Amino acid sequence: MKNNIIDLFKKSKSNLQFEEIIKKKAFNIYAYNTSINVKYLLAYNTFLEKEETVVYITTNLYKANLAYETLSKIAGYDNVSFYAVDELISEDLLAVSNDLKTERISTIASIMNNDKKIIITHVQALLKPLVTKDIFSSYRINLQVGNEINRNKFIKNLIFNGYEKTPTTSSTGDFSVRGEVIDIFPVFSEKPIRINFFDEEIESLRYYDVLTQISNDNILEFDIYPLNELVYNEEIKEKAIKSIKSLFPAVSNDSIYEDIKNHENDERFNKYINYFYSDVVNLLDYISSFTLIYDEFARIKEVYEKLQIDVLHLLENSKVNKKNKVLYLLDFNNLYNKHQKDIYLSDVLQSLPEVKLDALININSYLVIDYRSDIKNLINDIKINSKKTFIFAFSDEKRLGLFKEIFFEEIKYQEIYSFNDVNTGMVNIIKSSNSLGYGMFDDNYEVFTEKEIFRDFKFKQTKYRSSYQNTVSIESKEDLEIGDYIVHYDHGIGKYKGIKTVQVHDVRNDYIWIEYANMEIYIPVENITLLDKYQGSEGSIPKLTKLGTKEWDKRKKAISDKLEDIARELIETQVTRQQNQGYIYPLDDEFQELIENEFPHEETKDQLKAINDVKSDMEQGKIIDRLICGDVGYGKTEIALRAAVKTVLGQKQVAYLAPTTILSRQHYYTFKERLDKYGIRVELLNRLVSPKEQKKIIEDLKQGLVDIIIGTHRILSDDIKFINLGLLIVDEEQRFGVVHKEKIKKLKTNVNVLTLTATPIPRTLQMAITGIRQLSLISTPPKDRYPVQTYVVEENDVIIKEAIYRELSRRGQVFYLHNKVSELERIYRKIQRLVPEARIIIAHGQMPKEELEDAITSFVDFEYDVLLCTTIIETGIDIPNTNTLIIDNADQLGLSQIYQIRGRVGRSNKIAYAYLTYQKNKVLTQTAAKRLNAVKEFTSLGSGYRIAIKDLAIRGAGDILGKDQSGFIDSVGIDMYMRMLDEAINKIKGIKKEEKPYYDIEVSKHVDDDYVSDDTIKILIHKEISKISSLEEKVRLIKEFTNRFGKLNEEILLYIEQRYLESLLLKNKINKVNETASVAIIILPEEFLSKIKIEDLFMKAYHISNRFSFEYKRKILIMKIDKINNNESWIYLLSELLEKLI
């Protein structure tokens, strides 16, 4: 890697000594006075010098993540693997996030491929019991082009290996079967693989794109590794179940046995691994040659001892017979001194009585000062230490330039282009993306990166290599299943019963079978575009329409009338905005760029687009009324900040309106911290500001001395006057009352407005209001987020205690959610008993508003460790230091609630944990059982996640179009509602709905089971064919279907051609086509004939086929195509003729 810090570190005196010791092949080396970043450099250098796998072991998951992130940065993504487990020891874990598990399997796969890597792990992960390498390897499936395999056995083995058969393959662990094609998304692969068979022979292997489902890159060979670490066949499975049932009769939970039978959720029953196999190993037993590096051995031993105590406590509280052994952890004492090539790293020199050491070395390194933007002190320190070598290594070009400007006046420096060119005793500046901050006493130098210089700088974090892959958009996963409610544009709401095929003579047609309140009907697949899956608010059950009545028409009429009013208001607002000229702001100058370059976060693609759109509108003098829509923590405030700076530099004022005191306070601190040093005055108005201070701020605001005012509804009061308001930022407008909304509306007149919302809106609404409402969607998460580790588990005091202690140990805070106000005091006492050190405060919606805000403010200010609360935290709380969430009785909450609440954690660069608990031994109602089942899927993008997103999107539609619309949306479903909104907008615009002619062309509109057996995919095929409107689309679709499902038969090819022909007829205004048994008859209209030369028509028809004939009847030209005794359908001939005439 270019300009890698390792080039500098390798030349340090203590490292050269360290390398000499390694070359002498000393067994156990103890290196002390190693600062954290130097530990990583030593690990990387050991990997380079020894040219073998290095296993780097830390105390816990958090430190393992930090090591993985940093070593990936300096050693390169491809040289580092991650092997970690969830730090939760539980008797019965119902569900767990997939990220870490797939990462572990990827690491094992890498080892079995004999890849030399730096493997980052932690003590609990390294002690996880595994099957032997030989057993795991025996379940690996090798695929090679040209090899023959038994397809049925292959599918069975995939299920044994933990893969799930699905209609389409889009997530890690999915596989799907379609005729001669099998798609699979293996672990240890960033893309799914398409396997094309010719009988039993593998004809081709190709990677394909998840979003387009099109395959491209050919491969010759691939190994499919099990998705589970605990692998077994039928014989072993039966033996294990029998043993567990006989030895642990108290384990009566049938779902565990179901999971064993189905090869699912192996982490639930991994503790019984010794009843599957007698020989159990750890990860190190998989690696033939390696060096083991301990990061703080003494601390690792302490963690192991605590883990043993946790296991003992768990067993004491468990139902199992204590005489019968369950295996949560292997013995740590068998690790050290066993492999004889261990390196021990420590901050300070400590006694290691258990270890026989061969070499001891003082690295003599230290952590450099974190200046946090205090450039004045940095410059002073450089001047004082004039003989020391300073190296400033920045990855960001802008910050590098900014830093050089700062130094230009004060400090003499040398810009270098390689770490080999460092000037001793001078200040050196270099561009490097692979650097870390540290100091070396013996060499008298210090290295600084952006992280040590700029406040809150975060370098780009490394995503897990095989993080659970699921990149299909939510809309594309709305699978229609039997029993789902379905909406027909003309007939109303029914229940989908499946696809039926009807054959009349030689023509086979597929029909959508729908049950209505009083009858069942079959809808031809060519009318599939009139159908939508019903999507209402979570839990809404629609009433089936009674056919033959006016019930559906009345419902549609009521909604259409209301939608026309909404459409009219949207369009009138747009016209008014376009007619009025706003203030023209100047282009960004150097000062604006200087301010923005100081901002700590790297913008995402969506943020950059939104920022550019807002600035462009301001520079053109357009009056802005833009909605910024994005999940909590996705950076909407960053967009508002930049717009605010531009407004202030344009000599105008900014008002930022927040719905709560807490949020106004948080935004105030953000703006003030960023802008105060540039002379931009930011003030706060809410009830926490004293009356005396408020009076002064209000007076200064009137005089134009305050640039940005941030506050609650207080800034809507009559005594608030602006000298020159240019921008109003409204955060979560839907949370303000009617009176305040009216005041906001008045304030909006002739000023730019940015409205920020965290509630998602449906994609169909986005499309409908395009061009009518300015809209920016922030759908890309920040780059420094780890996935929230989610567990669904029985309520357990040991787990709750461990979860709270672990968060407190890293100076973090906890949300504990219990949704019954009357029981909060009882839960308070329980937490006090479990964690006496924890400072707990209660918050719920029945408290007086000011008391509630004071409680949450105290929690934000870190006066308390645990916020015991109800669902009031669902929206409007941003506390990055809170990264553990415990929800009691999660099965009783709605899925969208759980999704929103889970979003309160994972807001920083720490790993976040969410524990969704349900009561022990609870007999669940059928509804609660279904909800819990959905919550199980919530750990990935399963159906629970999609329900949550859709429910929130419906809320979002209500926020934009009016709260009273929620009932209307539920009465017809969101997609039908948006279809009607689109029609209403077109009606107000004067765009008439085009009536399409019906072409009576007889072809089979059928997808055979031999080609695709899944009804969901059949519906997709029919939908895609119905959309064909050009030659390019026809060719693309044939290519895509062949690629995805295998070679098309003539029946489907003719079906595609018939739809393509209809598109050509429609474009040429040819509305009348009839067929008899012997001839196809086409009436050619005058409008068509006026655009072509008649002689061209005759000549081209003659050249194509002698089956064409023409005749005039009553001044109308009629074209006929003979159908008898010909192999090629007349449809192809007519398509070819129309193509040549256009």
Image (cartoon, rainbow, N blue to C red):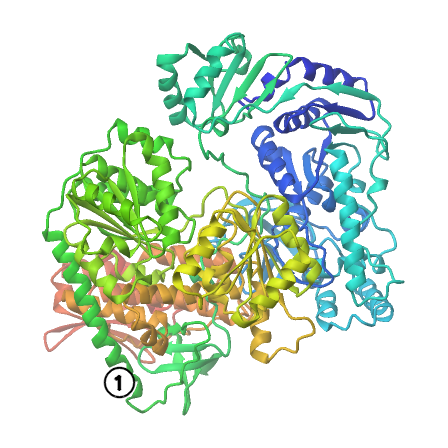
Q: Residue furthest right?
A: 323
The answer to whether residue 871 is above or below residue 148 is below
Q: What kind of element bears circle 1?
A: helix
The residue wearing badge 1 is 554
Q: Quadrant of residue 1124?
A: bottom left
Q: Label 1 crowding class (10 Å Cα cut-off): few <14, some 14-19, many 20+?
A: few
Report if residue 1124 is visible in the image. Answer: no
Q: Judge left or right: residue 290 versus residue 1034.
A: right
Q: Quadrant of residue 414?
A: top left
Image quadrant containing the C terminus: bottom left
Q: Judge left or right: residue 347 versus residue 699.
A: right
At 15% across and 43% down in the image, what residue appears?
Answer: 724
Report if residue 297 is visible in the image. Answer: yes
The answer to whether residue 230 is above or below residue 49 is below
The amino acid on which the numbered mark 1 sits, given as a three-letter code, is Lys
Q: Nearer the viewer, residue 351 or 287?
A: 351
